[in-house]
Image (spheres, grey):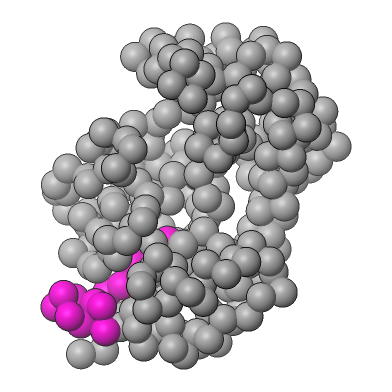
């Protein structure tokens, strides 16, 4: 069996899990069941792919990785491997060389505000500090800049956003030329009970305060061209919180997040 590969190239905490699960449901492909459904967490490659993964100078043995991933898909009777590991966005050219005609690609990103709130919640500890907020803003800028380079170097690869995907999931299949089929409910994450596609932006916005968002904006403000490249902009903290009230079914969960943090 010849295994093909579909790479979703996206920063972490930007919707790659739900998009990957949607693509699994649409294609019947193999989505690795490790971690947050990412190939980098497969036992045979984790030691390589999880060693300093966000260092752009790190080189991986993609021949070995392709072999192990192919074995996983074949063992499950599948001929398509869906790969969503976020650090792959730093290594697109090496991946293209190793996978050649056996791979197709999709770019995706989410707003800096969703990314920052999600990473603070998942990876930081209370109380949140101004320096940590601004560090996470810098993280988004670093990854968005790498995404921009990838897009400019590969204009044939389609780009979607988390927000637009949640509004109309079919944009992912349309971008890839895949016929939309009725999909079963998604698997969700171990820490997220949702089994359907829901835009959680309002929850993320409600997680931080006016002044905390203004601290974030101090870093983003010097990079407005990069935000505009992806269709985003700078919004004052008050405006971000007010916009969260536009999704009353989602926003209150964000205000409860700090209490569970």
On screen, residue 34 versus residue 45, left or right, reads: left
Q: Position of residue 191 (x, y in %)?
A: 33, 38
Q: Residue at x 44, y 44 (%)?
A: 15
Quadrant position of the N terminus in the picture: bottom left
- For the point 40% across and 84% down, which residue is it? 66
The residue lying toward the viewer, choosing from 257 and 83, is 257
Image coordinates for residue 154, horizontal then vertical, percent: 61, 70
Which of the 4 image quadrants contains residue 222? Answer: top right
**Does residue 222 appear in this view?**
yes
Q: Quadrant of residue 226?
A: top right
Question: Which residue is more in the foreground, 208 or 14?
Answer: 208
Q: Residue at x 58, y 13 (%)?
A: 241
Q: Residue at the right extreme?
A: 222
Total of numbered circles in the picture? Answer: 0
Question: Taking 201 as reference, is 81 left or right?
Answer: left
Side of 68 where 223 appears, left or right:
right
Residue at 53% x, 86% y: name it.
61
Is residue 168 positioned above or below 246 on the image? below
Q: Is residue 132 above or below residue 160?
A: above
In reply to whether residue 83 is colored magenta, the answer given is yes
Location of residue 194 in the rendering, given as x and y in whole percent from the top left corner: 27, 33
The location of residue 253, given as percent across then percent down, is 40, 17
Q: Could you say which quadrant of the image residue 235 lies in?
A: top right
The reply to whether the magenta stretch includes residue 196 is: no
Can residue 156 be seen by looking at this rendering? Answer: no
In magenta, the rendered stretch is: 71-84
Q: Work out whether residue 230 or residue 36 is closer to the camera in this orientation and state it.
A: 36
């Amino acid at each position: 069996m010849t295994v093909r590969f579909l790479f979703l190239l996206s920063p972490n905490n930007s919707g790659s899990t739900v998009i990957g699960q949607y693509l699994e449901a649409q294609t019947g492909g193999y989505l690795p069941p490790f971690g947050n459904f990412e190939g980098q967490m497969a036992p045979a490659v984790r030691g390589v792919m999880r060693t300093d993964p966000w260092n752009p100078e790190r080189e991986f043995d993609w021949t070995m990785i392709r072999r192990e991933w192919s074995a996983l898909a074949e063992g499950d009777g599948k001929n398509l491997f869906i790969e969503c590991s976020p650090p792959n966005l730093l290594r697109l050219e090496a991946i293209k060389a190793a996978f050649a005609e056996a791979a197709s690609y999709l770019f995706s990103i989410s707003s800096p505000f969703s990314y920052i709130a999600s990473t603070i919640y998942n990876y930081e500890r209370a109380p949140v500090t101004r320096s940590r907020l601004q560090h996470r803003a810098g993280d988004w800028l670093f990854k968005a800049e790498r995404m921009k380079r990838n897009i400019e170097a590969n204009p044939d690869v389609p780009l979607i956003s988390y927000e637009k995907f949640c509004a109309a999931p079919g944009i992912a299949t349309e971008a890839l030329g895949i016929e939309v089929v009725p999909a079963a409910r998604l698997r969700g994450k171990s820490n997220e009970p949702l089994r359907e596609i829901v835009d959680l932006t309002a929850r993320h916005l409600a997680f931080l305060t006016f002044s905390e968002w203004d601290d974030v904006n101090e870093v983003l403000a010097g990079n407005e061209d990069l935000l505009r490249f992806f269709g985003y902009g700078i919004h004052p903290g008050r405006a971000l919180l007010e916009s969260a009230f536009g999704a009353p079914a989602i926003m209150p969960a964000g205000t409860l997040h700090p209490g569970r943090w």
